[in-house]
Structure formats: structure tokens, C-alpha cells
Amino acid sequence: MARWDPGTEDRLRRAALDLFTEHGYDAVTVTQIAERAGITRRSYFRYFPDKREVLFAGSEQLPLAITEAVLASAEQSPPAIALDAARRVGALLVERVDRTAERRAVIASSPELRERERTKAAAITTALCEALVERGTAVGDARLVARLVAVCFQEALERWIDTGEDFESCLDAVAASVRSTTELFPPRVSP
């Protein structure tokens, strides 16, 4: 096998997910993942800094992709801009991700992985907020919109995994649900 085989990263991800599914995340070592992928433990660390990151490969690119999508959006209102960016990035993400239900189950099984997932989601929310501010949205409004759209984005990904529908339809359904539930917060009437 070539030293820098371009398929190694994919083999490592598949091997890790197979092992995590078979034995549980905590019971699997980096050495086992590397061996299953046909490389050495030392070589593993050329691709991933730790055992967790094999499940989150590429997620470090999402904040930049969100920022670029917000800045490139032709939409005008902050919620429309943020949803447009989420739609674009989500469409790219679902093209590149496979075995999502298995990955989700592994992450759900481990507090450590759930924390890593929340950290990655927070980075997306921060990038969304900062990009909206860069476009001229007030900080408080940008923060609220970013948080709401990040929740919509995550929920749309969950629905996409569960239903197999296209991501855009899932995001539109979630956004419609959020719009309808805002009626739960009627304006305050002063006595």
C-alpha cells in the first residue's frame, strides 16, 4: 500500500465506524482502527489527531462554508440570509456524508462524543452570527437569528437522516414549524 494512499482517510472512517458499531466507542482503540484500515497506529495520527475526530472529519470546514454562504447570499433579511446559507451548506454536507444513522448512534452512545458534537455546532452558530454582523445585522439580532437557524439546521439534518428526504425539504419544513410555533410567544399586553 502506498505511503500516502488517497483512500486511507476514507478507509479509516469506515473502519472506525464499523468497530464503534460492533464494539462501542469506548471499547475501540486507535490501534484497532488503524489495523482494520491496513495502516499503522503511527500513520493514523497523520490523518486524525485523536480517536474522536475520525467521526467529525471535515466538520472544521463548516464554519468557513457558512460564513462564505452568508456573505454570498442575495437575500436581504437576516433570517432569510441565514436560512439560505444553511440550505447551501446543508446540501453540500449531505452529499459528502454517509452512514449517518450509524454515526449518530455512535455519537449518542458517548458523552464525550456528544460534547464534541455540541462544540462543532457552536462553531457553526458563532460563524453564522459573525457573518451576519459583518453584513450589517445588529449583534443581538444576529445572535438570535444564528441560534434559531443553527437549531433549524441541526433539526433538518436529523429529519434528513430519519426520512431520507432531500435536505432542502427538511430545512423548509423545520423553518415552517418554527414560524408556526412562534405564535406560542404572543406579544405582552401591559395591564
Image (cartoon, rainbow, N blue to C red):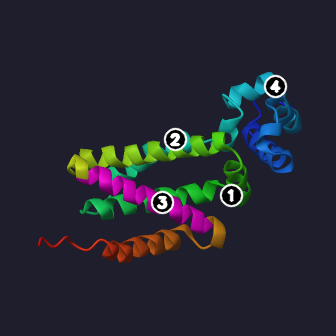
Left or right for 74, reference 36 = left
Location of residue 178 with respect to 139 vertically, above or below: below
Location of residue 160 with respect to 105 vertically, above or below: below
| Residue 148, image quadrant | bottom left
- Residue 151, percent from left and from top: 45, 59
Q: Nearer the viewer, mark 4 or mark 2?
A: 2
- Residue 162, percent from left and from top: 65, 69
Q: Badge 4: few (under 14), some or many (20 or more) residues near its Cα, within 10 Å?
A: some
Residue 158 is one of the magenta-drawn residues:
yes
Please tell me which of labels 3 and 2 falls first in the chain: 2
Question: What residue did someone put label 4 on?
Answer: 41
Q: Residue furthest top?
A: 42
Cα separation, mark 4 vs mark 1, equals: 25 Å
Please tell me which residue lies in front, 120 or 57.
120
Please tell me which of labels 4 and 1 falls first in the chain: 4
Question: What residue did someone put label 3 on?
Answer: 153
Left or right for 142, reference 16 = left
Residue shown at 24% from the left, 63% from the top: 77
